Amino acid sequence: MSSPAPQQVDSPSNHGPIVGVMTWFLLAATVCAVIARVATKLAISRRFTSDDLLIFAALGLSIGQGVVVTLQIGKGLGKHADTLTAPQLDSFDQFDYASNLLFIVNLCLAKVSVLQMLRTITPIKLHVRMVLGVGLFTLLWSLASEFVAAFQCSMPRPWQVTDNRCLDRTAFWNAYGVLNLITEAALLLLPLIIVWKIQTKLKKKAVIFLCFASRIVVLGAIVGQLVYQNRAAGTNDRTFMMWPVVLMAQTVQSLSIITACVPCLKPFLESLESGMLRTDDLRRRGMNGMYGYGSHNLTNLSARSNGKKEKSQVASNASAGKHYKLPNNISTVVSVNRNEDAERDSDSQKSSARIIKYTRTFSVE
């Protein structure tokens, strides 16, 4: 009976084990963050949205990349190249190639998830356009980067860096890192712009912004990745010099997912008790005004009622300043936009007399 292979430990000539340990530690933290996000969403709204699905996809890719990095360690990551065989070096290049492709898609999904969340919580059209603009740039940049990374070297072996015609990989990854920093900076700036318009206390605004501002740690990890990446440039000992680059890449993608989950946790949701989170729910029902940003026609509101009797009841409640019961037990105080008493009778047949405004949204049971 053969004895099991001795467990590898970190040493000056082999840093692969530390990369493996940190990779799975970061993955465990990422999984915990996503589970906390799911639990909070189920407890609060009992449904998932598109930003949740994007995070689930990013988590799946992150786990896949963790497996690829583990296999890459087995093929020499963290070891000196002169101690490896030619087949090991070729396999190392293949796993490095696959890891880079997964990394680009992973970051794109995490960023778009945050942008989708921002889009659904703001009722202001200018903010929505800004979010969509950043999202479109992120998608196009990621698609172009994925294409370049896929065809970095000559076919039919685009993964083979040694003894093959390849583009300047250092320049490409530096450009990718700079654009990565720019998009992350946009993900910090957009929440500040959006939160500034929320009609709530300054303390709550600060809590909301700080939840999104947690992504500043991603900026630090990207800078670290760029530093180690340039240190490894042009070396003949890629397998050894690349281990901190791979470790920083794992840190970047894990932190990107974790910080995308932070705004969904309970402190953030509690800071939105003024009704901001219900904006998306009302928008999907055809009601775009919240926080005094818009008004709604009574006819549109009552179109969801069944029959003239319910429509009449809605109008009666609006006239009396009563509560109008929206779908999913969302209670909203409504009031008619009245003119002076002398003008009210003459204008009673005009459409403006049927305009109502939401003054507060509250009490989701």
Image (cartoon, helix red, strand yellow):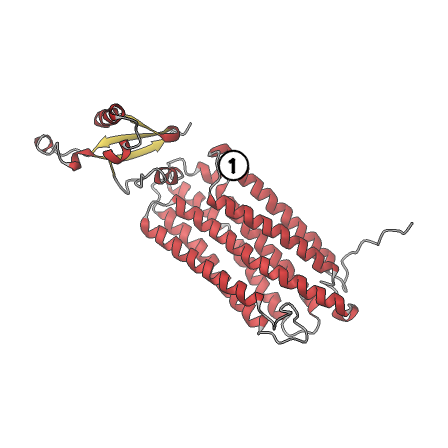
Name the residue that disc number 1 marks: 40
Asked whether, in this view, residue 202 is left or right of residue 305, the answer is right
Residue 360, picture quadrant: top left
Asked whether, in this view, residue 347 is left or right of residue 209, the answer is left
Q: Position of residue 261 (x, y in %)?
A: 52, 45
- Residue 177 seen in the current view: no
Residue at point 36%, 30% (across, down): 327
Q: Position of residue 266 (x, y in %)?
A: 49, 37
Asked whether, in this view, residue 123 is left or right of residue 18, the answer is left
Relative depth, front residue between 251 and 200: 251
User: In which quadrant will I find the C terminus?
Assistant: top left
Q: Position of residue 243 (x, y in %)?
A: 68, 62
Count residues near mark 1 (Cα–Cα under 10 Å), then give few for <14, some for 14-19, many for 20+: some
- Residue 299 seen in the current view: yes
Residue 122, picture quadrant: top left
Q: Is residue 319 above or below residue 2?
A: above
Q: Is residue 260 above or below residue 324?
A: below
Relative depth, front residue between 11 and 308: 308
Q: Amino acid at mark 1?
A: Thr
Q: Position of residue 257 (x, y in %)?
A: 55, 49
Relative depth, front residue between 179 and 57: 57
Residue 154, picture quadrant: bottom right
Relative depth, front residue between 363 and 215: 363
* Element marked by disc 1: helix
Residue at point 67%, 53% (across, down): 67
Give the residue at the far right of this rendering: 1
Asked whether, in this view, residue 252 is left or right of residue 270, the answer is right
Count of numbered labels shown in the rendering: 1
